[in-house]
Amino acid sequence: MSELQPIIPAQDDAASAAAAASAPQDTPEPAPITEQEVGEYREQDRFLPIANVSRIMKASVPPTAKIAKDAKECVQECVSEFISFITSEAAEKCQLEKRKTIGGEDILYAMTTLGFENYAETLKIHLAKLRQSGASASAAGTTRTEQHIEPRVEDE
């Protein structure tokens, strides 16, 4: 692949000769960024951890089922993209409202705006339960502990 080159404005010959004579000669030019380096943007910065994705996937299938590595990686990429999609819409709303913190309602709004109304309704209930358990835990003087959520299996 070709290397990306910095953009240098065009100058006529007299101006470029004068600029070259007055410019210091000992400042090194920064190395250009290659397309390969851009493509090698660290996966762990873009995607959810594969172990977490794998654990959630395993909880959704029978204990004897196996999940291929490429299936885990595919789901990892998809859910990471989905989260980015929803979050960017929520962030845009917050920016328009001159707020810096994305809240649960912003995520629900983004999901509804982007056509995920069915999921937004379920998550609205979950958010209310989460806040209720957080409020009751803080009233009792304890911190909220991690809750294990069993996947819902629907009969066909």
Image (cartoon, rainbow, N blue to C red):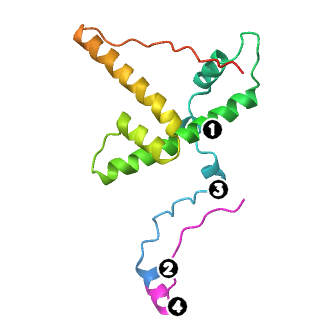
Checking the image for residue 35, the label placed there is 3
Is 72 or 7 nearer to us in this picture? 72
Label 4 to label 2: alpha-carbon separation: 13 Å
Magenta: main secondary structure equals: loop
Residue that badge 1 annotates: 78
The image shows residue 57 at horizontal and vertical percentages of 65, 22
- Closer to the camera: disc 2 or disc 1? 1
Residue that badge 4 annotates: 13
Placement of the C terminus among the 4 image quadrants: top right
Relative to residue 7, is residue 143 drawn left or right?
Answer: left
Label 3 to label 2: alpha-carbon separation: 22 Å
Is 79 or 126 nearer to us in this picture? 126
Q: Amino acid at mark 2?
A: Pro
Q: Let me know if residue 146 is in the magenta part.
A: no
- Closer to the camera: disc 3 or disc 4? 3
Residue that badge 2 annotates: 9
Asked whether the beta carbons under mark 2 and mark 1 sit within 8 Å of each other, the answer is no
Placement of the N terminus among the 4 image quadrants: bottom right
Q: Amino acid at mark 3?
A: Glu
Q: Amino acid at mark 1?
A: Cys
- Closer to the camera: disc 4 or disc 2? 2
